[in-house]
Amino acid sequence: MVPLSYYLVLSGILFACGVAGFLIKRNIITIFMSIELMLNGVNLSFVAFAAQWHALSGQVFVFFVMVVAAAESAVGLAIVIAVYRTRGTLNVDQVDLLKL
Amino acid sequence: MLHLIVFSVFGLVCVAGAINLLVQRHPINSALSLVVVMGSLAVEYLLLGAEFVAAVQVIVYAGAIMVLFVFVIMLLNAGVEEHTKGSRVAMLFGIPGVLIGSVLVAWVLLQHSGTGSVAVGALPGPPKVIGWLLFHDFLLPFEVTSVLVLIAIMGAVVLASHPAEVQQSAQPDEREG
Amino acid sequence: MNLGEFILVSIIKIVIAVGILLTAVAYTVWLERKVVGHIQNRWGPTRVGPFGLLQPLADGVKFIFKEDLLPPHVFKPLFIAAPMIALVFALTSISVIPIGNWVTVFGVHTPLEITDVNIGLLIVLGVTSLGVYGVALAGWSSNNKYSLLGGLRASAQMVSYEISLGLSLVGVLILAGSFNLREIVDAQGGTFWGFIPRWNIFQGQIVAFFIYLMAAYAETNRVPFDLPEAETELVAGYHTEYSAMKFAMFFMAEYANMITVACLATLLFLGGWHGPHRFGPPFVQAILPIFWFVLKVFVFLFIYIWVRGTLPRFRYDQLMAFGWKFLLPLAIANLVITALIVALRA
């Protein structure tokens, strides 16, 4: 029997790593991956609470979060490709001006 | 007991993967450690009885979204990340601060574990019931997400296609976006 | 049964299943060489053993003794890991494939598969999705233009046809009402009018069967969709830089994928292990379902090899256009029509 708080702590750790990666990393793609990590952490706490309160809507919501994450990564990576084509670099520090 | 062992093992794998994502300098290593995180999260979902969610996690997240990430890293030939001048002060105060903050939060959470334990398979999530919910209670969000996915497909195709072809609509666009 | 007994039985089943699968992979290679040889009006391997039956053994010995090169400019961790990833995921999907009914061997009542999960079909689809990584990482880590292009093409092709593969199976799911492979097969028991078996292929899923067939050829990178690994095209595509054992692992992974796909087609469309089984002594009656299953898998593999010997290959843009513009709408149409018919019948 695993207490619910263990799942929440794990979810919190994943979310914190995602936030840290988002703030620290300089490569656009790695920043995207940190966003996905945050979403995964949130998914875990959804499923944990769904199991605890016996409400299957938690799992359905995880399904929606995954679909939205898929749509967002598809468009986001297309934007990354477009940025790379115009700027020639994947480093966020060098794409921070509107002027090319 | 076995439940706790499996949870701990895969929880440790999750955390190790997440920290590896932060530590690695080449994006392909970060992508692969994220795949490992997603795989072990799928096992955690199975422990919570959410079998459909675990399968969808593997199929959609680890098998499609991360493949997309790996593709883009390979296509753009993303190299090793350059080290920009991070602030020394931020690292000196930031990392211990974050660690202390997270230990505090975790301690508070664990203290108040009166919210009860979650048994293995406490809430079975068979696909049939989830399908029922999706098509009855959550029908509107379901349809809206399908429209969202359609918009995302169109957006991705247009954004990633070559700029010249977007303007010359006379040329047939044979390439996949 | 208690935990220890369960683990022991599972380990024995895993060892037997993996052993049988690897032998089947080796002999599928032999079968292919013989059949393609005969289609091209020549003998296949004939010298090593009767009918060349020991040829896979000779090939195995060759692969073991060949020099295993590690080119200097590759990305070493992924270069070494990619064939292992491909092989592991190819072998994993055998764990949910049932080949017969529940049997009682030495007093242990166990199903003839490694595990009986409620989401067996989803697990096979998930493992197929994960198998793309082996190909993509092999192409990228070889640090070679041809390998990268071959790897990208192969993985884009696999990802595109996965969708049609999955959608073609949803019709079967609607008819059976469960993701559990054993229940899907059980829903195909019995016969129409006494002699036409109630297989899904006769229950209206014939279009889905052909969509599945074509998507499976593309998933396993076989002719007519084998552009990514054709020798005349990109040297050898994603496995250009691999030699000896690593190449053998890719090879085995490809044939193991073929066998998995054939097993899945048998379970979902051809009725699994159902067949005339009312004759013979009880011992034979227990073994007969396995025999029917193996026979159907063999027929499916034979069609695979027959197509390989007969058709030319698609160009890459024709291939992708076929997958997205023809197979996907057809699979969706099949799904909608099946759902309508089932809903109207109920």
Image (cartoon, coloured by chain):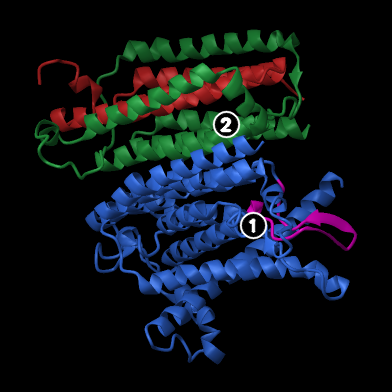
Chain colours: A red, B green, C blue
Instruction: Using residue C125 as the reference point, say whether residue C105 is left or right of it.
Output: right
Instruction: Using residue C110 as the reference point, say whether residue C159 is left or right of it.
Output: left
Q: Which of the chains bears the disc numbered 1?
A: C
Instruction: Using residue C111 as the reference point, say whether residue C74 is left or right of it.
Output: left
- Identify whether C53 is placed above or below A92: below
Residue at image point 69% right, 41% down: C118
Kindly indicate the quadrant of the structure image that contains residue A11: top right
How far apart, in angstroms, are the residues tagged by discs 1 and 2?
Answer: 37 Å
Q: Nearer the viewer, residue C311 or A84?
A: C311
Q: Which of the chains bears the disc numbered 2?
A: B
- Identify whether B166 is placed above or below C2: above
Residue at image point 29% right, 58% down: C72
Q: Secondary structure at mark 2?
A: helix
Span shown in magenta: C95-116
Q: Nearer the viewer, residue B53 or B100?
A: B53
Q: Which label belongs to residue C199?
A: 1
The type of residue carrying mark 1 is Trp
Q: Nearer the viewer, residue B163 or C108?
A: B163
Kindly indicate the quadrant of the structure image that contains residue C236: bottom left
How many other residues sit within 10 Å of disc 2, few (<14), some (14-19) or many (≥20)? many
- Identify whether C257 is placed above or below C65: above
> What percent of the width, then of the height, locates residue C203?
61, 53
The type of residue carrying mark 2 is Leu
Answer whether residue C101 is magenta in the image.
Answer: yes
Kindly indicate the quadrant of the structure image that contains residue A87: top left
Answer whether residue B21 is magenta in the image.
Answer: no
Reading the image, the residue beneath label 2 is B41
Q: Which quadrant: the C terminus of chain C?
A: top right
How many other residues sit within 10 Å of disc 1, few (<14), some (14-19) or many (≥20)? many
Q: Which label belongs to residue B146?
A: none
Residue at image point 25% right, 68% down: C232
